[in-house]
Image (cartoon, rainbow, N blue to C red):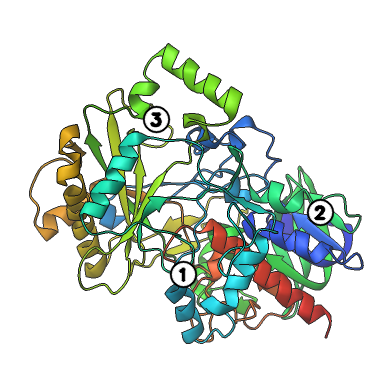
Amino acid sequence: MPDTAREPTDFGTFDVVIVGAGSAGCVLANRLSADPSRRVLLIEAGKSDNHPWFHIPVGYLFAIGNPRLDWGFKTAPVPGLNGRSLLYPRGKVVGGCSSINGMIYMRGQAQDYDGWRDAGNPGWGWDDVLPLFRRSEHHFGAADAAHGTEGELRVERQRLNWPILDEVAKAAQEMGIPPAEDFNAGDNEGVGYFPVNQKRGIRWNARKAFLDPARRRPNLAILTECHVRRLRLDGKRVTGVVFARGDALFEAKARQEVVLAAGSIGSPQLLELSGIGRPEVLARIGVSALHALAGVGENLQDHLQLRTIFSIRGAHTLNDRAATPWGKAGIALQYAMTQSGPMAMAPSQLGIFTRSGPAHNRANIEYHVQPLSLDAFGQPLHRTPALTVSVCNLRPTSVGASHAASADPLASPEIQPNYLSTDADKQVAADSIRHARRLMAQPHLARYAPTEIKPGPGPDDDAALARLAGEIGTTIFHPVGTAKMGTDAAAVVDPQLRVHGVAGLRIADCSIMPTIVSGNTHAPAVMIGEKAAEMIIAAGKV
C-alpha cells in the first residue's frame, strides 16, 4: 500500500519540526531548543554516527560510497564530462555531510555574500553574516574581529607535516601568490594550510558541536532512522510532516513551522514529493501539484575539481609511507599515541586561492594539494610517490538541476550538474590545467622532477584542455542553489528563508544559496543554520 493511501499515526505536536540533522539542522536544533518553552523535533533519516570512520579523519576515504554512511547518489551522464556519470556522496547519518566531508573550515569571500545582498537579499551581506560565523566558532587563535573562540564548532590547525607540501607552497610564492595569513577574513587569496574542524586530531562534526550539548534538554526530541516522506499541507500552509520509521507511518505536527534542512539534494526532492515545484516535474512523477514554484530543484551549482597528478622523486608522500605493512603499522601507531600524522589528515592539506587569468578581479580558483594519489576515492593509493594537485573553479557559470525521479520517496533523485556547459567554464578549466602545470614547473620544485601523470602530456590548446578537463573532472561535493533565495520568479525562498507562497515552511541549508560561495560549504551551512534560528525565534515572538 503506498504511503498516500495510509493514515499515519499521530506522533504529537511541536513548535518547530526540523527535517535533517546535518550541518544546519544540528545548529537549528541547538539554538531553538535553548528556550525551554519551545518544543523542537529533529528528524534524521540516517543512523547515529557511531562508526569509527566518522571520527578518524582519514576515514573519509572509506565513508564515501559506503551504504551505511552515504546515500550513494549518482549523477546522470554529464555531456561536459564526456558522458561520464559521477558518484555524488551525501552523508546518511546524524551530522550529515559534516560526518563524511573533508573537514575544511572555509567561509568563502566577502564579495560572495555582498553579491547575495545586492541581488535583493537584505541581511545577507558579509558584515551581516560575519557575526554568525564568529558565534559558532571555537577558533584556535585569539578572538578578534574575524574569529570567535566561544562557539561550539572547533577550528584547529592540522596535526601533521609533509615537507613536500612546504615546497609546493614555496613554489606558489615563486609564482607570485602571497602567503595567506587567514583564509577566512573575507579575502582568501594566497597559499597556506587549511584550518580544519577537528578536536585534537578527531573529526569535530555538527553532532558533536551542536547536538551533544543540547540532547538532554527535555524539550528537544531527536529521531534517527526516520525518513520524512512528505509535508502535510492545509491549503497553502504546512502543518507538519509525515515520516516512516520502519514499516510504520507517523505524522508530526508543527504549531509554528517546519524547517527543511535536508540539503541541496534532499530538500527539493521533499518539496516535489509534497506537490510543491515545477508542474511538469510533478506531472512526470505522478504527484498532484499543490503549489507551483518554478525554481524548485533548479539552479544547481557545484565546484568541479580537476585532479591533476604528478609523480615526484626525492620526497615522501602517503603513497610510499603506506605501501608496506610496516609503514601502515607506523602510521596507525602514531595516530594511536598522539592523534596526529597521516590518519589525522583532512583530504587536502595545502590550499591555494588564486586567479586563473588576468580577467578575474579576485581569486577564482582553489587548489587542494594532497601528498597522495589514487584513481578515485575509495580506491587504493598508488605505490610510488606522487602529489594530487586539484584545482576547482570557485564561481562556475554552468547550472544544473536536481529533481525527484519518482513518487517513491526512497528512489534516488535525478541529478544533472551540467558541468562545463558554458564557454566561460571551459576556459577556466583549460586555464586551470595550465596553471597547475606552471606551478609544478617552478624552479623550486625542479629537484623533485615532477612528471605529469594525469591528464598527461598532450595538446594544450583551449579545446583540447577542455576535453581533458571532462576526462579528469569530478565533484568536490559542494552542491548548492536548488532552492535559491531571492525575490525573482526563479526564487524558492525569500530573504527570511520562507518558501514563496507557502506559510509555515522555511528552508535552511545550502540549497538557499543564490550563487555558490568561493570556497568549501560546511562553514556557510552552519552560518545559514544560525541565521535561520534567529529568524524563527524572532517570528515566534510576534
* Residue 119 shows up from this direction: no
Q: Earlier in the sequence, mark 3 or mark 1?
A: 1
- Dot 2 falls on a residue whose secondary structure is loop
356 left or right, relative to 199: left
Q: Nearer the viewer, residue 59 or 282?
A: 59
Q: Which residue is mark 1?
A: 186
Asked if 472 appears above or below 428 in the picture, the reply is above
* Residue 162 shows up from this direction: yes
Q: Which residue is mark 2?
A: 214
- Dot 3 falls on a residue whose secondary structure is loop
Q: Residue at x 33, y 70 (%)?
A: 397
Q: Earlier in the sequence, mark 3 or mark 2?
A: 2
Q: Residue 526, position in %: x, y? A: 62, 61
Do residues under tags 2 and 1 come within 8 Å of each other at their CB atoms? no
Q: Which residue is mark 3?
A: 379
Q: Residue 89, position in %: x, y? A: 49, 46
- The amino acid beneath tag 3 is Gln
Q: Residue at x 69, y 55 (%)?
A: 152
Q: Residues within 10 Å of mark 2 (few under 14, many from 20)?
A: many
